[in-house]
């Protein structure tokens, strides 16, 4: 049978938008593999993202990130969550639009802040004023995220599952990506 998901769904957006958490839930709902570019890089390097930034520098990390994403896009249709900076590279945006579909998980600054402030795993936020850094990154990056194929808002009050259901809703309007069988209600958002 033709697979239900025809292209890899790539979750993009700011740190704390929920790309990793929602992507994992979405993959489970769709019954496809879940991959996270950060986790793949950490596994290959046997080091954390923060260690890679400190040891090899951000440009090295960005090159690895682009390579890993390009390789993962050649695989079976999956949900792929990428790091917040990945979609800034024009070549990566092109690869994603050619081989997959991008979904911008869009959240407001305070929602992002509430979600990132609990963890110190993100090297770019290890600054004197991480809230201000997050705000500046967001202002810088939104024009690139706006190039994503689909936009799904995620608010503070939304549960991870609710956001994943919203992504499915958006994907059902794209029959070139998600085949919906009228007799199959396993993807119905109200299940
Ligand atoms: N409604 C929600 N949607 C997404 N993430 C949420 C939500 N509520 C809390 N979180 C938490 O926010 C944190 C950041 O999410 P994460 O998936 O790591 O974001 P990203 O990969 O985009 O940086 C995680 O600990 C996640 O569990
Ligand atoms: O926004 C960024 O530049 C980054 C986001 C992180 O991933 P998440 O967006 O999953 O937190 C991780 O790739 C790295 O810390 C850099
Ligand atoms: Mg993540």
Image: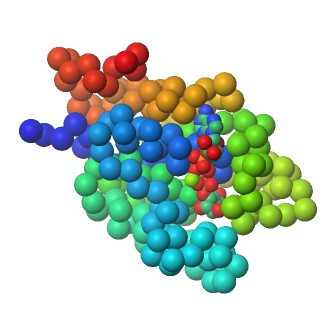
Q: Identify the residue at image location x=57%, y=76%.
A: 47
Quarter of the picture containing the N terminus is top left
Point out residue 91 in the picture as x, y percentages from the top left corner: 47, 65
User: Which is more toward the observer, 54 or 86?
Assistant: 54
Q: Identify the residue at image location x=76%, y=43%.
A: 113
Residue 104: image quadrant is top right
Residue 84: image quadrant is bottom right
Point out residue 126 in the picture as x, y percentages from the top left corner: 80, 64
User: Furthest residue to the right?
Assistant: 128
Coloring applied to the structure: rainbow
On screen, 4 above or below 74? above
Quarter of the picture containing the C terminus is top left
On screen, 46 above or below 8? below
Q: Is residue 18 left or right of residue 161?
A: right
Q: Is residue 190 visible?
A: yes
Q: Identify the residue at image location x=23%, y=31%.
A: 179
Q: Is residue 102 visible?
A: no
User: Furthest residue to the bottom?
Assistant: 55
Q: Is residue 109 left or right of residue 75?
A: right
Point out residue 19 in the picture as x, y percentages from the top left corner: 54, 46
- Ligand 1 positioned in quadrant: top right
User: Which is more toward the observer, 175 or 11?
Assistant: 11
Marks counted in the figure total 0
Q: Is residue 104 left or right of residue 4?
A: right
């Amino acid at each position: 049978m033709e697979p239900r998901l025809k292209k890899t769904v790539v979750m993009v957006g700011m740190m704390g938008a929920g790309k990793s958490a929602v992507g994992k839930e979405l993959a489970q709902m769709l019954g496809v593999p879940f991959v996270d570019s950060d986790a793949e890089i950490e596994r290959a390097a046997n080091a954390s993202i923060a260690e890679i930034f400190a040891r090899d520098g951000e440009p090295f990390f960005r090159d690895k990130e682009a390579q890993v994403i390009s390789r993962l896009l050649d695989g079976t249709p999956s949900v792929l969550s990428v790091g917040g900076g990945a979609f800034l590279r024009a070549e990566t945006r092109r690869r994603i639009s050619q081989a997959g579909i991008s979904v911008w998980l869009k959240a407001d600054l305070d929602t992002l802040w509430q979600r990132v402030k609990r963890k110190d795993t993100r090297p770019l936020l290890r600054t004197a004023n991480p809230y201000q850094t997050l705000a500046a990154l967001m202002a810088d990056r939104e024009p690139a995220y706006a190039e994503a194929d689909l936009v799904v808002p995620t608010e503070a009050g939304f549960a991870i599952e609710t956001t994943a259901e919203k992504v499915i809703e958006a994907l059902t309007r794209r029959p070139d990506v998600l085949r919906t069988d009228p007799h199959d209600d396993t993807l119905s958002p109200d299940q």
